[in-house]
Amino acid sequence: MNTPRFSVIIPAYNAAATLARAIDSVLAQTSPAHEIIVVDDGSGDATAAVAARYGTRIRYLHQANAGVSAARNAGAHAASGNWLAFLDADDWYYPNRLKWHADWIVRDAALDFLTGDYEYRDPAGKLLGTSMLSKASGQTLLRKATGAREVVMQGDDFAAFVADHFGDTHTLSLPLATFLALDGYPTGFKVCEDVHFLIRLVARSRLVGVVCAPLAVYSIHPASATRADPVRAQFENVRTLRALGEHIPLLPVLVRRGYAIRLRQARLNLGYALSKSGQRRAALRAVLPSLLESPGIASVRNVLSILKG
């Protein structure tokens, strides 16, 4: 029996205001986690004190500030469970997050990893939307599920998922051995590091379990760095995706197709951000590589869109 023992990794940086809610949501799971590992990424606030209140109910690790990828990787390397789940310190799980995945893993050992739907909420808790309904790939799988809570993603589904995925880090469950084989999350990137990892994960997968019900909450912060400086955020997005280039020739055709679409859209988003900031020539330079790498109607439309402003 493929019994999962979940190590839940919570990276935390200056997260004193939200860490307790994240930890409490894991402790409240209907199927208890094997362990909760909080990785303090060099916080300068009371994050350590908040974690200390939980005593032996969690494992607390501290490292010099190195970024969220390094924190997640450190937690995974310290894990004693056989499956990993992740939760950022400002987000939280719903009670059946682990149970629904664990039960399915026990029933079907062929699943390479699992993901699922989640909600977007603002700091006041207001529901802003759900992930699967907001993405074309998610909508396709919801139709495929025909009302069922579970649906398997495979084959042609992967191209759309890579192009615009609906499942984020906090709904991802995967074997520890798989995570280690992929060398974890890439370091040195501030944006899109989760997509870099996810594309490599999809490339080695055949069957993926998708729960078509919200498993967690992604907290939207209007004042976050990505919203405060959209040009920098979109530039970093493109940089991270381009770093995947060395892997692309070795990836399955469907994954390469989805990657090409995602990179083209990332360049367009950078172009829009530059154009809105008055940098029209830079905006055009941002999208032109797509026309050279993926000549076609979509790339031409992107260039024309920037030219028209």
Image (cartoon, rainbow, N blue to C red):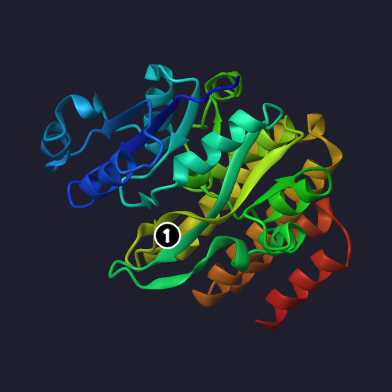
Q: Nearer the viewer, residue 213 or 294?
A: 213
Q: Residue at x 72, y 57 (%)?
A: 145
Q: Nearer the viewer, residue 24 or 28?
A: 28
Q: Is 259 situated left or right of 125 in this image?
A: right
Q: Which residue lies at the image location 39% right of the left edge and 38% below the top edge?
A: 68
Q: Residue at x 28, y 34 (%)?
A: 41
Q: Residue at x 39, y 48 (%)?
A: 95
Q: Mark 1 is on which residue type?
A: Thr
Residue 205, by quadrant, is top right
How many numbered discs?
1
**Foreground residue, 8 or 259?**
8
Q: Compared with residue 93, is residue 102 higher up or lower down, i.e. above or below?
A: above
Name the image quarter holding the C terminus. bottom right
Q: Closer to the camera, 276 or 59?
A: 59
- Give the labeled residue for mark 1: 226
Q: Provide residue 155's location: percent of width, then percent of height.
A: 83, 43
Which quadrant: the N terminus? top right
The spot of residue 248 in percent (x, y) is: 76, 35
300 sits to left or right of 262: right
Bin the neighbour count of mark 1 within 10 Å (Cα to Cα): few under 14, some 14-19, many 20 and up: some
Q: Secondary structure at mark 1?
A: helix
Location of residue 74 by image quarter? top left
Tell me if residue 203 can be seen: yes
| Above/below status of 11 relative to 164 | above
Residue 15 seen in render: no
| In this view, 151 is above or below 291 | above
Provide residue 223's location: percent of width, then percent of height.
32, 66
The percent position of residue 243, horizontal first and vertical second, equals: 63, 38
The residue lying furthest to the bottom in this view is 308
